[in-house]
Image (cartoon, rainbow, N blue to C red):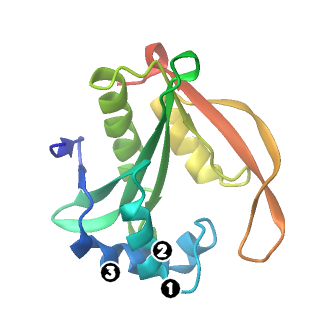
Amino acid sequence: MTVLRGTSVALRPTVREDIRPLAAIRATPEVRARWRGGDDLEADVAADLEDPGTRMLTVGHRRRIIGMIQWYAEEEPDYRHAGIDLFLDPSVHGRGLGTDAVRTLARHLVDVHGYHRLIIDPAADNIAAIRCYTKVGFKPVGIMRQYERGPDGTWHDGLLMDLLATELVR
C-alpha cells in the first residue's frame, strides 16, 4: 500500500523502525490509560506489527511520527466490514489530526477496498474520541457493558460505533 494523504496527516505502512517511537507514545499516561499493553511496549508494538490480521499505519504530521492507526477486516461475505483503532501523541490532541487520520483511512477502506460498513469502539467515557469519530460520520450503536479490562484491573464499558459508506463525511 502506498502512503495515504489526508489534509494534514500522512498514513504509511508501519515498519520496524517505527516501533520505538510508537512505544514511546503508547507509554504516555494519556494513551496508556486507554490502550492495552503489557510492561514491554516495544514488544507489544512489534507483536502487533507481526499480526497478519491487522494492518498498521504510522500517522505522520510535519515529518514527525504522531501515532498509529490500524485496521482489520471481517471478510465473511454475509458480515463483511472493517474495524479501525487509533492512538495519537497527547501533544497533538485537539488539533483535528485524529479526525483527519480516521477520515483518510475510512475513505481508503470504502473507496479502495469496497467496505460498506466500518466500526470503531472507543471507551464509553472517552468523549474526545467519540467526538472525533462522530465528525467523520460514525454513529453510536450501543454500549458494550464491561467490554474491556482497564489498566486498573476493573472492567470498563465501550461504545460500539459504526459508519455506513453513504454516511462518510468527506
In the image, which disc is placed on residue 58? none
The amino acid at mark 3 is: Arg
With respect to residue 155, does 99 lie above or below?
above
Q: Is there a contact, CB below 8 Å, between mark 1 and mark 2? A: yes
Query: Residue beneath label 3, please?
Result: 20
Tell me what residue is drawn at x 24 percent, y 41 percent: 6
Instruction: State which quadrant residue 34 falls in.
Output: bottom right
Kindly tell me whether residue 93 is visible in this rendering: no
Task: Name the residue beneath numbered marker 1.
Answer: 40
Question: How far apart are the alpha carbons under marks 2 and 3?
Answer: 11 Å
Mark 3 surroundings: few (<14), some (14-19) or many (≥20) residues within 10 A: some
**Residue 116, horizontal then vertical, whole percent:** 46, 18
Q: Is residue 107 left or right of residue 77?
A: left
Q: Secondary structure at mark 1?
A: loop
Viewer-nearest of labels 2 and 3?
2
Residue 106 lies, in percent from the top left, at: 38, 33
Q: Earlier in the sequence, mark 1 or mark 3?
A: 3
Q: Is residue 59 left or right of residue 75?
A: left
Residue drawn at 25 percent across, 72 percent down: 16
Residue 15 spot, x, y in % from top left: 23, 65
- Give the position of the N terminus as an image quadrant: top left
Instruction: Say above or below: 71 vs 166.
Output: below
CA distance for labels 1 and 3? 11 Å
Residue type, numbered disc 1 = Asp
Residue type, mark 2 in image: Asp
- Residue 44's disc is 2
* Residue at (41% x, 24% y) in the render: 169
